Amino acid sequence: MGRKTGSHSEITGPKIRLAALKLFARHGFAAVSMRQIALDVGVQAGALYLYTPDKQSLLFGLMQDHMTGLLAAWATQPQPANPVDQLRHFTEFHILYHLDRPDAVFVSYMELRNLTPENFAIIEGLRRSYEDELEAILKRGQTTDVFSLPDTKIATLALIAMLTGVNTWYRQSGRLSRNKVNAIYWDMVRKAVAA
Amino acid sequence: MGRKTGSHSEITGPKIRLAALKLFARHGFAAVSMRQIALDVGVQAGALYLYTPDKQSLLFGLMQDHMTGLLAAWATQPQPANPVDQLRHFTEFHILYHLDRPDAVFVSYMELRNLTPENFAIIEGLRRSYEDELEAILKRGQTTDVFSLPDTKIATLALIAMLTGVNTWYRQSGRLSRNKVNAIYWDMVRKAVAA
DNA sequence: GTCTATAGGACGATAGAC
DNA sequence: GTCTATCGTCCTATAGAC
């Protein structure tokens, strides 16, 4: 209660990261001050620098963790036998993973231009790795003639853009369950790539 | 050359808007200062306020002009007879119009959160109007059984997200012509909504 | 119409007390 | 580990000279 000072950093680091993610998603990296983050956490601005060397590193860490977490989660997914099932699994995985982390997704897509060139290159590499996972599925289906695509790379980007778009309109209180959303998008994805 | 002062505002207004659009797209609204815009235009910061009451109005004007321009351009397009041709025409129109205005598109999609609530409501209304144009096409095709969609509203949002995604990767110097891009996307759009 | 100058405040980051 | 206090810089917006 009245405790104004003392050592209670148990979870200050994570709290800072969570507050920064929320505020960056809501107002944008450049529009959020270190003082606002500190206020949200309940510490003074100077205390933030015990946990991050600067504001840029805070942003980069959030984006890097999101992308590596996404890749790691996909890597542990079971791999169905045929390309159609693989694509369905990717579609559902992508939608659910992204719906679960709207702030991290938003920040990772919107704040790329606020990264230093070095940090930008790293995040772009991780994003490319994720795109390659989907493109590999499309290529396999193309080879076995279950998919028909004029350009697998562009199809990859088009599908990811379409699927990630869910985050711009989905609301938990809306008329559609997550399963229903999955079904609607899978119907379009399946047909879009079909032979 | 040496002219440092005097009256030469002939095109200062448009120059300010163009510079602001470029800088907002590149660095983000919150990260760009009025001084940077003035430097880019070649005037002092104070002079900007002859053309805009404040920074917020500058942003809002850019976004409003983009959205009203988009709606006006679509309104003048010829309307093909059947839903399939209408959808193909919308697909090509959307891709080309957006590829021609990457900065305005980027700002209009990324800076929504930097609008005041009143301005946000206006831009959202314009965006909704544009979405309604596409949904009307999908509904007509659904009625005549040439399209089969579980949910026309979500299909609308999914298609627009997919098409607008072109702007994230297209480069004029790339391997694909705009016509080829149109063809690739139309192939996927056509199949995605097909009965 | 544009300039110079500035008011008034917020910013990122650091230093030193506790 | 957190605080208070502060440095030096930058910000938006305005006032008044030309």
Image: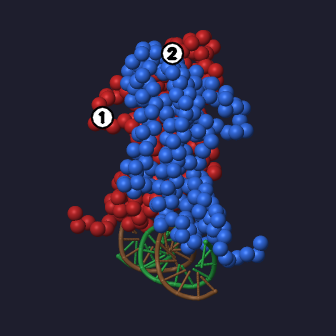
Chain colours: A blue, B red, C brown, D green
Q: Are marks 1 and 2 in contact (CB under 8 Å)?
A: no
Above or below for C7 versus B4: below
State the image quarter where residue B157 is shown: top right
Query: Where residue B84 is drawn, which disc sits there?
Result: 2
Q: Residue at x 53, y 24 (%)?
A: A80
Report the side of B22 relative to B160 (left or right). left
Query: In front: mark 1 or mark 2?
Result: 1
Question: Can you name the residue that lies furthest to the top here?
Answer: B145
Report the side of A54 relative to B135 (left or right). left
Label 1: state its secondary structure: loop
Label 2: state its secondary structure: helix
Instruction: Quarter of the image for the N terminus of chain A: give it.
Output: bottom right
Question: Is residue B44 shown to the viewer in this render?
Answer: yes
Amino acid type, callout 1 = Gly
In the rendering, at what x and y percent does residue B31 appear? 46, 59
Frontmost residue, A8 versus B156: A8
Frontmost residue, B50 versus B149: B149
Instruction: Quarter of the image for the C terminus of chain A: give it.
Output: top left
Frontmost residue, A124 versus A36: A124
Q: Residue at x 43, y 48 (%)?
A: A123
Instruction: Give how far apart the Cα atoms at labels 1 and 2 are.
Output: 29 Å
Tell me which chain the residue with mark 2 is part of. B
Comes first in the chain, label 1 or label 2: 2
Dot 2, how many residues are within 10 Å of its Cα: few (below 14), some (14-19), or many (20+)?
some
Q: Residue at x 49, y 45 (%)?
A: A67
In the rendering, at what x and y percent does residue A111 appear? 48, 51
In the rendering, at what x and y percent does residue B89 appear? 46, 21
Mark 1 sits on what residue?
A: B174
- Whether marks 1 and 2 lie on the same chain: yes
Above or below for B159 versus B41: above
Above or below for B47 versus A112: below
